[in-house]
């Protein structure tokens, strides 16, 4: 007969064994808890810092090279228009003139938009082959096309950053194969908000550049081309433009730099045109340019020097080409109003720029 005391003893034994088993870990497996992965921040690449800055000017003659040197300019730019079948030997004399006078030379080369429109794929390669042959002659920089976001320079219906990147890709490869020392600058778009985005007729510069970035253009350029030639205030100002749409980024030097930098943060900027229009000495400004009516030659000289200072100190700008040095035509297109060589061969900007570049 099983007594109550015996059952109680067995119960006590079971309880004690359970306690001992728990203490030893027993045979039951405790679920393994995997610790959560340690989250680490993805390293952010350091911001691009450009440690070299040069100044130059776009020229229409070789008459004022000494004045350019006094302004601290070491580059000059000339534009070349390519037609299918042209020989690259046509630019040889320009390259020799630059190097023979102690300058580096930037060739801004654009083509024929009607020829481009007829057969874009064939034209891209044909144009690239021409640029490769030019590169073999030893220029220091080549800008691939000019203001290709507007219908004045590119066929209507074909305007777009992706299309231009196809051309840029072919051009870059041809140039670097011929001469890896040539700086390849993407064609500077026309700064504008006219199109309110992009359409068949044209594209604002910011969305155009964004399309280029998305198409991989960054790997096919050494420098991002940029134009700034509608300013009517000091480049040190970032507000206060009295025109309509006064907050638009194209109104101000700083917002142009910031906009382009945000789209291509890994590439330096090259101003292939930067200038201020003054009608002083030429009469009234032509229709369409009334916004510059109050800009004086003194303004022009001071603002160019301020732009050079900002560019030099920015860590973002590699090259600033003044638009322009010595144009003489003043009409519907008031090129001479942008020139720093004014009537009587006076060059106030040469003095102000020289003070910046020569440390005076």
Image: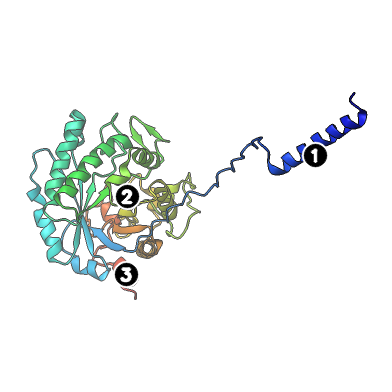
Q: Left of 38 or right of it: where is 5?
A: right
Where is residue 14 drawn, in percent x and y? 80, 34
**Residue depicted at 14% across the width and 63% down the height:** 99
Of the 4 image quadrants, the one containing the C terminus is bottom left
Secondary structure of residue under mark 1: helix
* Colouring method of the image: rainbow
Q: Residue at x 69, y 43 (%)?
A: 24
Secondary structure, mark 3, is helix
Read off the residue under disc 3: 357
Q: Which of label 3 and label 2 is nearer to you?
A: 2
Q: Is residue 37 left or right of residue 288?
A: right
Q: Nearer the viewer, mark 1 or mark 3?
A: 1
Q: 114 or 136, which is in the foreground?
A: 136
Ranked by sequence position, the earlier of labels 2 and 1 is 1
Among numbered discs 3 and 2, the one appearing first in the sequence:
2
The residue lying furthest to the front in this view is 1
Where does the image place residue 95, in percent across and percent down from the top left?
13, 57
Picture layout, residue 116 above or below residue 287: above
Residue farthest to the bottom? 360
How far apart in space, not on screen, are marks 2 and 1 (Cα)?
Answer: 81 Å
Q: Camera-side residue: 240 or 261? A: 261
Task: List x then y, in percent, for residue 171.
Answer: 20, 43
Query: What residue sits right under mark 2 in the picture?
Result: 224
At label 2, counting other C-alpha atoms closer than 10 Å, the crowd grade (few under 14, some 14-19, many 20 or more) is many
Q: Residue at x 32, y 50 (%)?
A: 224
Badge number at residue 16: 1
Separation (CA) of disc 1 from disc 3: 92 Å
The first of marks 1 and 3 along the sequence is: 1
Q: Which mark is residue 44?
A: none
């Amino acid at each position: 007969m099983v007594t109550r005391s015996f059952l109680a003893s067995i119960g006590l034994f079971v309880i004690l064994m359970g306690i001992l088993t728990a203490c030893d870990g027993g045979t039951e497996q405790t679920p393994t808890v995997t610790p959560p992965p340690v989250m680490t921040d993805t390293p952010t690449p350091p911001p691009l810092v450009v440690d070299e800055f040069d100044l130059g000017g776009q020229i229409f003659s070789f008459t004022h090279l000494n004045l350019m040197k006094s302004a601290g300019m070491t580059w000059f730019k000339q534009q070349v228009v390519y037609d299918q079948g042209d020989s690259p030997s046509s630019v040889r004399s320009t390259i020799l003139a630059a190097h023979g006078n102690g300058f580096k030379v930037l060739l801004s080369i654009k083509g024929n938009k009607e020829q481009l429109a007829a057969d874009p794929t064939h034209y891209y390669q044909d144009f690239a082959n021409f640029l490769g042959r030019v590169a073999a002659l030893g220029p220091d920089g080549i800008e691939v096309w000019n203001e290709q976001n507007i219908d004045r320079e590119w066929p209507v219906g074909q305007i777009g950053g992706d299309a231009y990147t196809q051309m840029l890709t072919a051009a870059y490869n041809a140039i670097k194969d011929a001469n890896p020392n040539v700086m390849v600058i993407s064609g500077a778009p026309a700064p504008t908000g006219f199109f309110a985005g992009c359409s068949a007729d044209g594209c604002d510069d910011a969305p155009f550049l964004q399309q280029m970035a998305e198409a991989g253009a960054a790997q096919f350029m050494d420098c991002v081309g940029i134009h700034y030639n509608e300013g009517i205030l000091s480049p040190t100002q970032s507000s206060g433009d009295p025109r309509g749409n006064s907050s638009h980024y194209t109104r101000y030097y700083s917002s142009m730099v910031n906009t382009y930098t945000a789209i291509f943060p890994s590439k330096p900027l090259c101003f292939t045109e930067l200038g201020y229009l003054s009608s002083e000495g030429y009469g009234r400004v032509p229709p369409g340019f009334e916004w510059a009516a109050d800009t004086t030659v003194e303004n022009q000289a001071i603002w160019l020097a301020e732009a050079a200072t900002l560019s030099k100190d920015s860590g973002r700008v590699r090259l600033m080409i003044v638009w322009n040095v010595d144009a003489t035509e003043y009409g519907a297109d008031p090129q001479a109003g942008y020139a720093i060589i004014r009537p009587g061969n006076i060059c106030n900007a040469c003095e102000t720029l020289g003070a910046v570049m020569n440390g005076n």
